[in-house]
Amino acid sequence: MPTLSDLVVRHTALDAADLDWLHSLVSDWQLLADLSFADLVLWAPLVPPGEEPFDDLGRQHEGGWIAIAQMRPTTGPTVYHDDIVGTVSAQGERPLLDTAWNERRICREGDPDWSTGVPVREETIPVRRALPGGEGRFLAVIQRSTNLSSARTPSRLELTYLQSASDLAQMVAEGRFPFSGDEPILVRSPRVGDGLLRLDRGGRVTYASPNALSAYRRLGLHADLVGAELGKVTATLCYSDEPINEDLMVVASGRAAKETEVESGGTIVQLRAIPLIVGGGRIGALVLIRDVTELRRRERELMTKDATIREIHHRVKNNLQTVAALLRLQARRLQVPEGREALEEAVRRVGSIAIVHETLSHAPEEFVDFDDIADRVIAMAGEVSSPEAAVMPRRVGAFGVLPSLIATPLAMALTELLQNALQHGCPKRLQVVVEPSSDRLNVLVWDDGQGLPEGFDLDSSTSLGLQIVRTLVEGELSGRLAVSPREGGGTEVTLSIPLPAA
């Protein structure tokens, strides 16, 4: 399905600022759909190729309309079971769209439409973008379609919803919603069904939904909310000897479009204020409320778990470095060259594992930037090279972010391959070439050294380093390992490792 941006760029004359405004609108118009109990479809003036979109009076030419966004209500039955984004409507096919656009007003005329088999009430709302010091610019029209099949005498809650929806629609038509300069509303922000309070201009509660009242009961409220000043009530519940949070007073009084959280008695409630500004003046506000106690508790548990895991990695790294130091100390005391060399190899193997754990101790998740690990492993392997040879391995390509389950054995495998090449191949050049794909990681380690011995066979090789690499790649990483002579001299080792699905 094409995106809103694609449709606007390809089929309309709207500019980048207009597109940003529409993105802000659709990021938050679930609020309008839920308060209206209605489907919303955003229609933009369609511009045929080579034609201008507007006449001298700013009215639309005979280009028709294109649906660029759609939203269904969570509070009532939908009208459109199929997606209609991308649908084109010719001029005159939807008269209410034309009227709302040309007359710059909300249109509510007409009887219910029965063409789909159920009664549907259609309304249209012109979308205006506020401009500094000007009347604004009209961008599109919202079609609001209400399924009347379950119509009944509305309750107080439904009447409050509908009145709030009417005020919000008027704000859209006047260019006062979405709120200019605000960040897009996050998915975790409170929704209409979570809890709703309606405030008057003075910040007093005129209506409290059952869910909103329950949230305040959990905060410790024993009186009725209706008629009370929400800011004072909330401050009384949440603050005693501490200074009052200014953001709380601004949000709870409905004076600014902001969000905040309050905590009392182990309960955490999220508040979001939507000032209602109609006809140039603030007539009140909506405050959406959501009990996020369990959500915040789980987030804190995850933060504690992450901190514990990072501390474990840090301690493992320290222990491995201690083991490496002990092995290095023991190697210095040995008089047998073979024994000293074996212990030095063990030090490097332990060091490669320690590098991974050190990286994980700073990572918030069990994923690491393996490029940093690879560069440190390469630098550590370069220390094996004799001073007169001065061979420094190079990395070509990027590993990217890898899970720790892959990072640890891969770091050890690279350590062994680089160490073997430098100690036994005597190369002048040594490279690690990385070729990642969507489902596999392909790594080529090549050198221009002495090459493989006569009659070399990986399956019968007695090299401890190659046996370790084969066990790591094929056993732990379920990958493939190939060792072959390099054209022009030297050796190349290919690793092909499957990556987990994203």
Image (cartoon, rainbow, N blue to C red):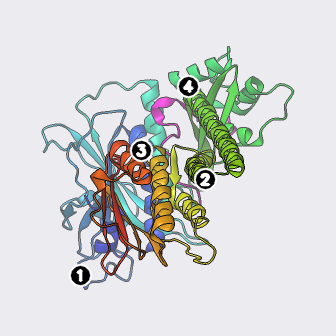
Which numbered disc, 2 or 4, marks the residue that appears first in the sequence? 4
As drawn, 237 above or below 80: above
Could you say whether the residue bearing mark 1 is in a helix, strand or loop?
A: loop
Which numbered disc, 3 or 4, marks the residue that appears first in the sequence? 3
Which residue lies at the image location 43% right of the left edge and 38% below the top edge? 35
Cβ atoms at labels 3 and 4 below 8 Å apart: no
Q: Quadrant of the N terminus?
A: bottom left
Could you say whether the residue bearing mark 3 is in a helix, strand or loop?
A: helix
User: To which residue does mark 4 refer?
Assistant: 294
Measured in 3D between alpha carbons, the distance from the residue under mark 2 to the one under mark 1, in whole angstroms, is 73 Å
Kindly indicate the quadrant of the structure image that contains residue 25.
bottom left
Range shown magenta: 181-203
User: To which residue does mark 2 refer?
Assistant: 344
Q: Magenta residues: mostly which secondary structure?
A: loop
In the picture provided, is 2 more to the left or to the right than 20? left
In the rendered structure, find residue 49 and report the number of the disc placed on it: 1
Q: Nearer the viewer, mark 3 or mark 2?
A: 2
Q: Where residue 179 sits: x, y (%)?
A: 56, 55
Q: Which amino acid, mark 3?
A: Gln
Cβ atoms at labels 3 and 2 below 8 Å apart: no
Q: Nearer the viewer, mark 1 or mark 4?
A: 4
